[in-house]
Image (cartoon, grey):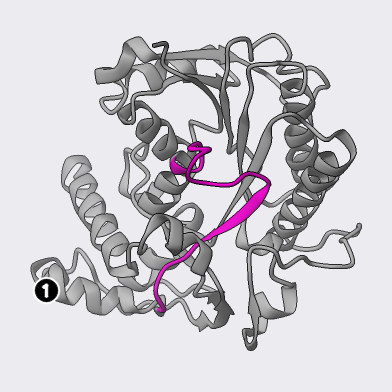
Amino acid sequence: MAVDLVFITGATGHVGFAVLTDLLKAGYRVRASVRKAAQGDMLKGHAFVQPFAENFESVVVPDGTVEGAFDKILDGVTYIEHIASPPPQPSEDPENDVIIPAVKGTTSMLYSAAKVPSVRRIVITSSGVAVIPTHALVNGDEQNTYTPNSRVRPLPTAPWGPPFFVYQCSKILALDAIEKFIVEQKPKFTIVNIVPGFVIGPNMLDTRPEQMLLGSNRGAMAPLLGLTESPRPTVISTLKDVARVHVGCLDENKVVGNKSFFVPSPKMAHDDAKSIAEKHFPAAVKDGRLPLGGTTPSVYLSLDSSETTEIFGEMGTYEDAVKELIEQYLALKEKTG
């Protein structure tokens, strides 16, 4: 029997690479879109991909926001993992740098997939910020319980504001565009939205320790390295769980389509990273490789992610993810000197 082919976007990113490697380990054939051919070569040559090289291929898509960008590269595809989306970033033109790529990159994929009879399901990476209002993300909110079916209304409009809130707006609008597509186009395939929090776990594409302060891992690394971060919600997801839920949602017998799923982690505080380091890496704390002394203040929310755990079982803990982060950090520090 032929092995199902999965098309994936965003495979050169933190979450995307973890999903890519889990797909290959699960036995799928994978076709990854990259912006440049060199990125495809990098992925194929990576130690985590090499054992499955015969099941991996890449295709160059310079701009996924262009109408029809994916039309010619979905032949034979059964499933799609759409993970690519602009991260929070400073920009003088957030509309064109973040908002439009997030929304049109998603709708372009959906309309291309609608032309391909073999596509049965699309799994899309959303975000907790798409379903939790700004005031709750900033100030906390344990009085109201948020679910993956919560929605932020009214929809945001320009002016967009600081980078993190631009990112939030892009995710809100992309999710809205997906749901409008389902209602208006009534596609033959089903869609599942994965709604993670701040994703914590080793980015296996990192080659230098300072790279680990980029993206969502910064909230866990800052307390370990004597840095002070702005407050952030304690809505975290371990990278391992995010990847396995993405892959698990391809199982149409296990997961009903046209739904959204949180990827939860048990209650924690970002500064717990310091006690985790002291517990598991006392030598690195003592010799100053992990100076501690930093802080990422925690903001608390109430979430209901029971449907996810009913299907996929218990999720990993912050301690699990931080241990793996520290192991990677110390290894890279030793390797690079």
Spot the residue most to the bottom.
143
Residue 58 in the image: above or below residue 246: above
Determine which quarter of the picture holds residue 257: top right
Residue at image position (33%, 49%) is 202
Kindly identify the residue that appears in the image at 57 percent across and 81 percent down: 302
- In this rendered view, identify the residue nearer to me: 337 or 230: 230
Residue 317, above or below 187 = below
Percent x, y of residue 120: 62, 27
Residue at the extreme front: 253
User: Circle 1 sits on which residue?
Assistant: 286
Residue 311: image x %, image y %?
Answer: 44, 56
Residue 165 makes an appearance in the image: yes
Q: Position of residue 269 (x, y in %)?
A: 41, 80
Q: Is residue 326 left or right of residue 126?
A: left
Task: Answer few, some or many: residues within 10 Å of disc 1's Cα (few below 14, many 20 plus, some between 14 and 19).
Answer: few
Extreme-left residue of the structure:
283
Report the predominant secondary structure element of the magenta stretch.
loop
**Stretch in magenta:** 248-267
- Residue at 35% x, 26% y is 24
Quarter of the image with the N terminus in it:
top left
- Name the kind of residue labelled 1 in the image: Lys
Task: Tell me, yes or no, whether the highlighted magenta stretch contains residue 220.
Answer: no
| On screen, residue 12 above or below 124 | above
Q: Residue at x 33, y 62 (%)?
A: 316
* Res. 92 visible in picture: no
**How many numbered marks does the figure carry?**
1
